[in-house]
Image (spheres, rainbow, N blue to C red):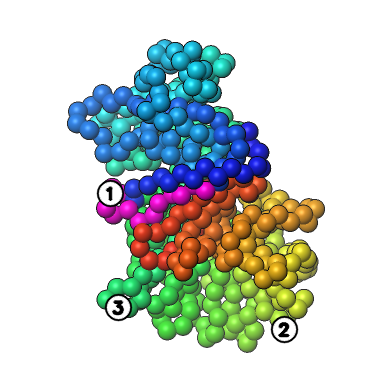
Amino acid sequence: MMKNLLKTVAVLVAVSLSVGARAQLVVDITSGIDDPTPIAVSPFSWSGSGVLSEDVSGIISADLRRSGLFAPVPKADMLSFPKNPEEVVFRDWRILGTEYVVTGRIEPQAAGYLLTFDLVNIFGQQKMFTKQVSGGSRQLRDIAHRAADEIFEAITGIRGAFSTEMIYVLEERRGGRPSYALMRADIDGARAREIRRFSAPVMSPMWSPNGQEVAYVSFETGRPAIFRENLRTGARQQLTNFKGINSSPTWSPDGTKLAMVLSKDGNPEIYVLDLNTGRFTRMTRHFSIDTEPNWMPDGKSLVFTSDRGGKPQIYQLTLATGQVDRLTFDGDYNARPRVSPDGKTLVMVHRSRGVFTIATMDINTGRMRVLTETTLDESPSIAPNGAMLMYATKRGDKGILAAVSLDAGVKYNLPSQRGDVREPAWSPYFD
C-alpha cells in the first residue's frame, strides 16, 4: 500500500479551527499514493438529545484522507449507514470496492461522551476489533482523533499521530504594526489558539518531550533571549540574557537539558544547559559558526550545522568524547538538522543548484532523497511516529505550512486565512 508513486488528488478540505468563521488554516491535499485504500466511515449514531457540536465520523474520515494512504468513501456514495458490524452487508461494500468499514455509536456520559467503534474487513468478511474512546464535554475532536489513530495503526501497522498537535509562529499586522503570536493547534490545524502574543519577533519554538512545555526565542527584551513556558499554567522562565546570539533551543530526550547556541564568548557555539542546576556547558570550540543543534534519540550525541568545512553542512558531536564527525556531503548547503524517532534518518534543509528544499538522508548509508519541490522550504519538524514531517514554505509571497511523508509519497499544505505562518513544531505523543 505504501508506494512512492505520486498521484495528485487535488482535494480541498476545510478544517474548522473551532467552528466556522474562526477558521485560520485549511488542509489542501496535493499528492497521495497511487493506490490509496478505500475505507468507509459510516455516520455514527448518537443516543443523546440535541445535535452534536462535531461530526466525529467526518473528522475520522478527514484524518485518514490527510494521511494520503486512504480514500474514504463519500457519504453520498454509501448504499447504507450501518451502526454496528451486524448491519454491514458485505456484498454492498464490495460493489463499491471498499476494503474496510468503520461503524460507531456515541453515547452521552455524565462527564462527556463515549464512542464505541468497530473496524470491519470487507474482503475478509470479519470484524477486526471493537474499541471504546471516551472524553469530556469539549473533547469530541479528541475522541475522533484517537479513534482515527486506532484505525490507522490496525491497518498500516504504524502508530497514528492524529491526536498530536503543532505549535507555530503567526505573523500579521494589527493597527498597522507587525504582531507575532505563538500558536497551538491540532495537527489538522483545528482549534488554533494563542499561547502568547508578542510585539517583537518570536522564533524557534520546540516542544518538551512530555508535551507540557515549550522553549522558544523572543526578542521582547530588545535582543534574542530563550524562554521556557508551561503550556498548562502559562508560567514562564527566561533562561538566557547574554549579549549576542541566544538561539535554537532544543530539549534533550529526557527533558532535563536544553542544547542551544550562544555567542557570549565571542563566537556562536553549541552549549548545553542543565535545567536542574542552571549550569551552562560549552560543547564546541571552533572558529567557525556552529548552530542549530538537535539531539539524537539516545541523548548521547547532537547533530548541528557548521560552516567549518567552508559551507554549511551537518555534523555529529559525541557528548562523552567531544568527537565531531561530518555527516552530509551531497549539495552545497545542508542545515537545520532533525532526526527521526528511530535515529536512522536525518531530515534537513538542502540546497542544490540554488534551490532550497527539504531532504532526508539515511544516516547509515548516506543516501539522500529530496522530498519537496518548492524553492523556499525550511524549518522541518518530524511526527513522533516518523511517518511525516511538517515544514514552512511559501505560496506566492505568503508563508504557509506544509507536510510530506518521509517517502515523499504524500503531501499536503496548510495555508493560513490570515497572516504568515512559519516555524512549525510537531508535538510528541501526550501519553
Is 402 placed left or right of 198 in the picture? right
Q: Which residue is mark 2?
A: 287
| Kind of residue indicated by mark 1 | Gly
Q: Nearer the viewer, residue 343 or 396?
A: 396
Pointer 2 local density, CA inside 10 Å: few below 14, some 14–19, many at least 20: few
Pointer 1 local density, CA inside 10 Å: few below 14, some 14–19, many at least 20: few
Marker disc for residue 220: none
Q: Quadrant of residue 398?
A: bottom left
Tell which circle, 2 or 1, labels the residue nearer the N-terminal end: 1
Query: Does 56 lie within the magenta span?
Result: no
Q: Position of residue 297 (x, y in %)?
A: 65, 54
Gap in Å between the C-alphas at discs 3 and 1? 26 Å
Residue at screen point 33% across, 29% down: 114
Query: Does 24 lie within the magenta span?
Result: yes
| Kind of residue indicated by mark 2 | Phe
Q: Nearer the viewer, residue 73 or 111?
A: 73
In this rendering, the label closer to the viewer, 2 or 1: 1
Residue at screen point 39% across, 38% down: 59
Q: Which residue is mark 3?
A: 176
Q: Position of residue 327 (x, y in %)?
A: 76, 63
| Kind of residue indicated by mark 3 | Gly
Gap in Å between the C-alphas at discs 3 and 2? 42 Å
